[in-house]
Image (cartoon, rainbow, N blue to C red):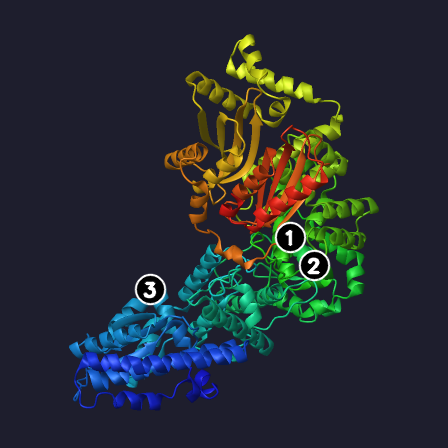
Amino acid sequence: MATKFDLLPQRRAIIDRRAVADGLAALLPGSNDTAALRAGGTVILKAALDEGRAEIARRLAGTPTRGSEIAAAYAFLTDQMIRLIYDFTVERLYPINNPSAAERLTLMAVGGYGRGEMALHSDVDIAFLTPWKQTSWSEQVIESMLYSMWDLGLKVGHSSRSLDDMIRMAKGDLTIRTALLEGRFVWGDEALYDEASALFNRDVLRGTARAFVTEKLAERNERHKRMGDSRYVVEPNLKEGKGGLRDLHTLFWIGKYVYQVRSVPELVDKGLLTKAELRQFQKAENFLWAVRCHLHIVAGRPEERLTFDVQPEIARRMRYAERPGKSAVERFMQYYFLMAKQVGDLTAIFLAHIDETFAGRGRRFGLPTLRRKPSKLDGFLLERGRLAIPSDDFFAQDPVRLLQMFAIADRHGLEIHPLAMRAAGRDARLIDNVVRRDRQANAYFMDVLTSRNTPETVLRWMNEAGVFGRFVPDFGRVVAQMQFDMYHHYTVDEHSIRAIGLLNQIEKGELAGDHPLASKLLPGIVQRRVLYTAVLLHDIAKGRGGDHSVLGAEVAEKLCPRFGLSPAETETVAWLVRYHLVMSDTAFKRDLSDFKTILDFAERVQSPERLRLLFALTIVDIRAVGPGVWNSWKRQLLSDLYEAAEEVLRLGHKQTGRRERIDAKQAQLRDRLGWDEARFAKYVTRFPEAYWVAESVDILEGNARLIETSDAAAKPLSITAAPDPDRGATLVSIYAGDHPGLFYRIAGAIHLAGASVIDARIHTTRDGMAIDNLLVQDPFGQPFEGDDRMKRLSIAIEDALANRARLVDRLLAKPHARPRADAFSIEPAALIDNRASNRYTVIEVNARDRPALLYALAHALFQAKVMIHSAHIATYGERAVDVFYVADLTGDKITSASRLKTLERLVVDAAAGTPARKAA
């Protein structure tokens, strides 16, 4: 490992150990005052450590991509500090004149420090080894050294063991064994270190390679699962995540354990990597270490996750520049994901060799044997259950085989041999326009895309090999492309492939619990390959600048004929790509009880088959964004919109009139309540028609019982709150005397209680009472429930409406809960539309999400002297889209140009964060 340090330029500029040692030796001449010596020594050592770190930081700023060198520099500095501390301890603090055989001590670096790789805030993992049980002298030295390291602010991971303890614990614990595997002599008794190393090789490593590999791969799989099981998560963990540093470490650990290599280049001598693959390994390692070193400096702590708030700064430090359609941070992250992909490719190749080493005849290491041998492999071979190629030039003979291999793998449910994947990755460049236009090649591609087996898996393999991006260059442009926002969890290519996998699962009925309506509809879809192609292409034009839906439709018109789709199918795919956001925008940002919303949507869709296709595409697009994005409230809204639009498309908008729908609801409600005709008729007259249209029968029933109880008790304010599993939220109903500003006070109170409003309908009875129905969730998108929470919610609303506490002051005092959102700059905007509804003016506000945003907007509308009929709240990561259906105080639309301009200014100011006190 010393060779890493030998290659460091100007090591004395980092630390001149001899000069520091001289300073320590000259400290308090002749003094035996241990406390005074340690205090003085700490000052000298801290100055040397700070100067060394400052020098390394300067080097990183000057050459921001030389990660491996910087990682070695931090480890070199740590080595020198520990040597100085050891010498100072045994020479000045606890000197010993005639040490016995038991009073020997060796210091061994283990783990990442043992590899000679560290970032600024990495742990100093060190093992103190003694030949037998510790003596009082060795205990004093170890304790004193630890105190000295802690005084310097080093984060130390240490162990103190005898040789016997070391061997016994390494045999029983995989983590200890892995740490010791990278053990490196730092200082102390070198002969004792050599003895420990020989014992470890003889008693721990010998004969246990198979068990170690099995355990290490299982540990790796578990780690991937814990980190999201994708190397394309947009806030990746660069140490533990898939395609991160730990994966590279695992390769080296296995190589070292099984083949006794001492450095990564020796993996080439053992035939485990080619020279080109070694360069890829070193390139990926160098880049990841550079990012990690920058991250530790920027974060000021041992941070391993590339969160949104640090990504722009690291991109700047590593000198990434903006390009048309792509910001600097998006270019930096795209390169990061390409490096992570490279790590994945190397892992697959390496494990293929491990397979060859440990598998029995005709078997695969750690995997089941194949049950039957498929026929018709068209020249491909079956090797231990995996699809392989007969010769190295097999793809060069006919590049169409690059597509055929994946189609055969999908058809027979075969895994592809890593060496065949290696050849595919190398030969993907052979895919040119001739291959892209080849009818058979396109047929193979469509077989995989529309497969009823597992298209997601095989498409991902195709993407990993680089074949996908070469065969569909437009897709190649979005490979590893991230979207710099808090909404999308994956890169564009990973999102699209996941969406295809979800579509396949829904079609097979595997997600019927989450998607009952879609699971019923999908098997009956006529244009199946249109749907799969649209899902593949819906985001293909992202990162080009401009509307990706419009640009994507143009790409679809060009690609679909090549894929073998008819002109009619091509037209439908292009339409789906062009309008793939329309259904979610309508469902989440518009009032579905306003019949004009349904009519406008149905007019755009035009056919029941298109509606079914768009419904399925919308579901998988949302769900493939990332975990936690899909919920039952979104399912409810999309299903409601689908069923309402389907009725219009099937029957025409005059078949079920507004009056008939109101009469049907009222009849159902009367049956549920069991009231007599006169009593019910009197109740009905209290409400305008809009109330009966807007609310479902279950909410109407809940409101009726709340009003009945409240009126009987003559209560001025009544609140009910109950979780609603079907809507994935808690329904809060508030019955009170109507007065201006009621809704903004309720919104502020709900925020103070720790909940957020996702939907609100506000009604006023003809006798001056307000009945407001709000759906609220907790900060994790789940129903806001629990006795304590419900009580807190009710008290907060009561206090706000009674003006018991100064709402503005309490809101200003509440801390900002989303510091990561500060990384994004979103210019607030308000869109006012008088055509979206026949009865109301629709205001759509786009802004950065922040605490109490709804309160601020509702307060602005109160100031503008408008009445809110309904509010619909959608969040997309850091972006909030709040939509209000409003009318003036006479119940009419707002049409005056000056009033509309004032209204727009007030809500934009509120969205921008005008302080609540000033607004009040």
Residue 771, percent across and down? 53, 26
Asked if residue 626 lies left or right of residue 808, the reply is: right
Q: How crowded is mark 2: few (under 14 residues within 10 Å), some or many (20 or more)?
A: many
Residue 914, percent across and down? 54, 49
- Which residue was labeled with disc 2? 475
Q: Which amino acid does label 2 sit on?
A: Phe
Image: 753 above or below 371: above
Label pair 2/3, CB-CB below 8 angstroms: no
Q: Write down the quadrant of residue 666 in the picture.
A: top right
Q: Which labelled disc corresponds to residue 834?
A: none
Sequence order check, earlier mark of 2 and 1:
2
Question: Is residue 519 something that shows in the picture?
Answer: no
Asked if residue 346 lies left or right of residue 832, the reply is: left
Q: Which amino acid does label 3 sit on?
A: Asp
Is disc 1 placed on a helix, strand or loop? helix
Question: Is residue 838 something that shows in the picture?
Answer: yes
Give the CA separation, mark 2 to mark 1. 10 Å
- Which residue was labeled with disc 1? 496
Q: Which labelled disc corresponds to residue 173?
A: 3
Front position in the image: 857 or 353: 857
Give the CA separation, mark 2 to mark 3. 45 Å
